[in-house]
Image (cartoon, helix red, strand yellow):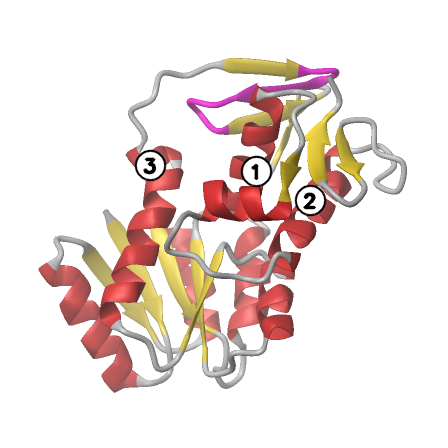
Amino acid sequence: MKILVVDDEKLLVKGIKFNLENEGYQVDVAYDGFEAVELARSSSYDLIILDVMMPELDGLEACMRIRDFSTIPIIMLTARSEDMDKVIGFEHGADDYITKPFNILELKARIRALLRRSALVSNVAGTILTIGDIIIDTEKRIVLKNDQQIELTVKEFDVFELLAKTPGRVYSRENLLNIVWGYEYHGDIRTVDVHIRRLREKLEEDPAQPDYIMTKWGVGYYIRG
C-alpha cells in the first residue's frame, strides 16, 4: 500500500514516514499543497495524509483540488480540535480527521480503518445494486446515474452503499458513525449530516426534495424502498 504524507513540518513528516514504513507501507512525502496535488495527480496512492495549515496552498484547498480528479481516501491533520473545523474539512472532501498532537498508534488505526473500508483491501464479492436510475457496483465501487459515473469519496460511497443494501431501514446518525467510521472514530454526528447532504447534491435531481435518500425526522436516514 502506497501513502502520501503532506505537511510543512519536516520533522513530523520524517517521523510519520519512519513509522509507516516500519508497518510495511511505501511512503512518499511532500511539504506543501501544490506538491501534494501534483503528486496525487501523477502517481497512484492508496491514501493521503494531508495537513490543514500549510503556506501558499493550504490543506483544505489541496483536498478540494484532489477531489476534482480522485476519490482516494484522505486523512486531514489539524492543530485545532473544534468540531466545526472538522465539519469544514469533510465539506472539502476529507474522509477522516486527526488532531495534533496525536499518538502514532491512533494514526495507524485510522489508516487501517479507512483502507479496510475501501475497495483497495476488500476481498468481498461484488454486487450490483439498483435504486431507480442509480446503479451501484460494490466491487468496483462505482456509482452510475443515467449511465454517467458519479464521483463519490470513500465515506460517501460507504454511507450510500450501506443505506442502499437495506432500503427502508432507518439508520440513526450514531449507527452510521459506528458502522461506517468504525469504533476508532469518535466524531461529531454532524459529520453524517455533511455526507448525506453531499450525497444528495451529487445524486438527487433536487437535493431539497430528495427521491432516494430520505430523512426520518428525529431518527435518521434511509433509502426509499
Q: Vertical placement of 120 versus 111: above or below?
A: above
Q: Does the segment drawn in magenta span residue 135?
A: yes
The residue located at (64%, 67%) in the rendering is 88
Task: From the viewer's perspective, tell me whether residue 23 is left or right of residue 50.
Answer: left
Q: Amino acid at mark 3?
A: Leu
Of residues 54 and 138, the one nearer the viewer is 138
| Label 1 vs label 3, nearer the camera | 1
Quarter of the image for residue 28 reads bottom left
**Crowd tier of the residue under label 2, counting other residues whose Cα lies within 10 Å: few below 14, some 14–19, many 20 or above:** some
Task: From the viewer's perspective, tell me whether residue 15 is left or right of residue 127.
Answer: left
Q: Which mark is residue 159?
A: 1
Q: Amino acid at mark 2?
A: Ile
The residue located at (10%, 61%) in the rendering is 22
| Label 2 vs label 3, nearer the camera | 2
**Residue 36 position within the rendered picture, expressed as x and y whole percent measured from the top left:** 42, 66
* Cα distance in 3D space between marks 2 and 3: 23 Å
Secondary element at tag 2: helix
**Residue 189 position within the rendered picture, expressed as x and y whole percent measured from the top left:** 62, 56
Q: Amino acid at mark 1?
A: Val
In the image, the segment drawn in magenta is 131-141
The residue located at (60%, 33%) in the rendering is 160
The residue located at (44%, 57%) in the rendering is 74
**Residue 119 position within the rendered picture, expressed as x and y whole percent measured from the top left:** 38, 33
Residue designated by label 2: 196
Q: Vertical placement of 190 versus 103: above or below?
A: above
Answer whether residue 58 is visible to the viewer in this image.
yes
Residue designated by label 3: 120
Of labels 2 and 1, earlier in sequence is: 1
Task: From the viewer's perspective, tell me whether residue 208 is left or right of residue 48.
Answer: right
Quarter of the image for residue 209 reads top right
Q: Does the segment drawn in magenta span residue 118?
A: no
**Residue 194 position within the rendered picture, expressed as x and y whole percent measured from the top left:** 68, 54
